[in-house]
């Protein structure tokens, strides 16, 4: 891609950030406009005037409306999903395709609003749980680095050998490692996190599916050696929340389950495509084995149990999925919250333990120094 084109897209994305964060308001206004039988061009022009007015100025909204109008002015017959594809996030484009085929476009847009709000709630829960440790950890590193490079080296130069008890020696060794390799380790951790985040929507296969199904208690125990297992579970549950809300919108619009899965697979990430392909393949060979199709790692045990219970009550499967995508998605959000809080607790405890180790270690070394250099103790040693 041309660098200038890439920069232009990046700048456009930045300008649209505020509009995208409030897009549920736009969908609601568009639904009301459709119900009033207002022409789409008229709606866009009037809303653009409001967004550009000095008293009600909204540059991000004006940019989005202007882009939609430019596309509409080219004279082609565009569907709703095509008109809005450039200004809306990728996860909305699939659900917008349901508006294209729906007989009740306003009603489908209102379903889309609910889906967007549910996804925002899930994302907000995850960020609230993970943000505090992410803010705290750099502070812990700074504290450790200052202690390791300023305080401990001064003590080492003047401390007699008897100061270095096993505990004090362990604090000294850790501080020396931080001073010598701290920034290298921090850089490696940062790079590992970036690679992990980049691979989250791309890496797929039986190994990842197995890791995503590790029970939370086991994942907590494995955290010191396999810290990526819990984040994989959080990502799976978050994507399932989006999947269920998207499926609910598509099925409400009149699409069949197979058509909905095919549409989602075409627009999904490689990770989701791999899962949906397994579901579709099973349904193709056994069209009524819904639980078995969705039990191959995509849904968590709790959601799968809810699915099985609802089907057992004699409901149609598309109705069950619509219920899960509207009411049942709250259970998925609860799972995200529990797992994210567990990860939060682990990170906070790890940070607190490190700070406590260094702080108590410094106090212990200082106390040992005071005892060792006390004149009375020295006279006793001479005798």
Image: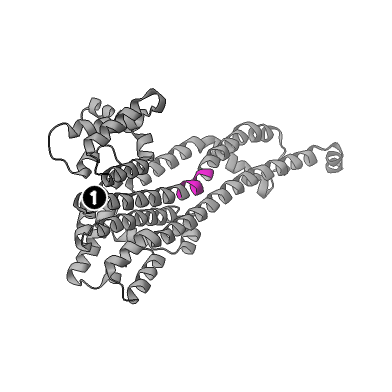
- Of residue 360 and residue 321, the one placed in the foreground of this image is 321
- The foreground one among 284 and 193 is 284
Q: Quadrant of the C terminus?
A: top right
Q: Is residue 362 magenta?
A: no
What secondary structure predominates along the stretch shown in magenta? helix
Q: Secondary structure at mark 1?
A: helix
Residue 294 visible? The answer is no
Specify the quadrant of the image occupied by residue 245.
Answer: bottom left
Q: Where does residue 278 sit, x and y in percent of width and height?
A: 24, 63
Name the residue at 51% across, 54% down.
Answer: 341
Name the image quarter holding the N terminus.
top left
Q: Which residues are magenta?
A: 126-132
As rendered, which of 151 and 84 lies closer to the eye?
Answer: 84
Q: Name which residue lies at 79% across and 41% down.
A: 371
Where on the picture, by quarter, is residue 364?
A: top right
Q: Name the residue furthest left.
A: 76
Q: Position of residue 152 (x, y in %)?
A: 65, 36
Indicate yes or no whether the magenta region holds residue 127. Answer: yes
Q: Determine which residue is flagged by label 1.
A: 99
Count the marks.
1
Q: Residue furthest front?
A: 36
- Residue 41, given in percent of the width and then of the height, sits at 22, 35
């Amino acid at each position: 891609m041309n660098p200038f084109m890439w920069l232009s897209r990046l700048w456009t994305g930045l300008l649209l950030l505020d509009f995208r964060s409030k897009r549920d308001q736009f969908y609601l206004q568009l639904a009301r406009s459709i119900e009033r039988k207002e022409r789409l061009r008229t709606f866009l022009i009037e809303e653009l005037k409001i967004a550009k007015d000095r008293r009600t100025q909204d540059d991000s909204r004006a940019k989005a409306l202007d882009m939609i109008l430019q596309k509409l002015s080219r004279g082609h017959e565009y569907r709703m999903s095509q008109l809005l594809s450039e200004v809306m996030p990728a996860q909305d484009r699939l659900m917008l395709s349901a508006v294209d085929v729906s007989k009740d476009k306003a009603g489908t847009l209102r379903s889309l609003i609910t889906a967007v709000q549910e996804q925002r709630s899930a994302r907000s829960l995850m960020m609230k749980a993970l943000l505090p440790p992410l803010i705290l950890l750099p502070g812990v590193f700074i504290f450790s680095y200052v202690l390791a490079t300023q305080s401990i080296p001064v003590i080492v130069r003047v401390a007699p050998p008897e100061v270095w008890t096993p505990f004090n020696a362990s604090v000294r060794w850790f501080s020396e490692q931080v001073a010598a390799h701290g920034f290298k380790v921090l850089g490696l951790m940062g790079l590992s996190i970036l690679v992990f985040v980049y691979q989250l929507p791309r890496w797929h296969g039986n190994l990842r599916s197995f890791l995503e199904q590790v029970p939370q208690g086991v994942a907590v125990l494995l955290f010191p050696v396999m810290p990526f297992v819990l984040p994989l579970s959080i990502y799976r549950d978050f994507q399932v929340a989006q999947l269920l809300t998207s499926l609910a919108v598509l099925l409400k619009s009149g699409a069949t389950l197979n058509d909905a899965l095919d549409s989602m697979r075409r627009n999904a990430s490689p990770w989701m495509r791999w899962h949906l392909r397994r579901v579709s393949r099973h349904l193709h060979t056994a069209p009524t084995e819904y639980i078995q199709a969705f039990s191959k790692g995509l849904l968590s045990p709790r959601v799968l149990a809810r699915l099985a219970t609802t089907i057992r009550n004699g409901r149609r499967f598309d109705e069950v999925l619509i219920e899960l995508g509207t009411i049942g998605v709250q259970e998925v959000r609860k799972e995200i919250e529990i797992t994210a809080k567990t990860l939060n607790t682990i990170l906070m405890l790890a940070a607190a333990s490190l700070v406590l180790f260094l702080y108590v270690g410094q106090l212990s070394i200082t106390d040992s120094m005071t005892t060792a250099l006390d004149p009375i103790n020295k006279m006793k040693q001479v005798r």
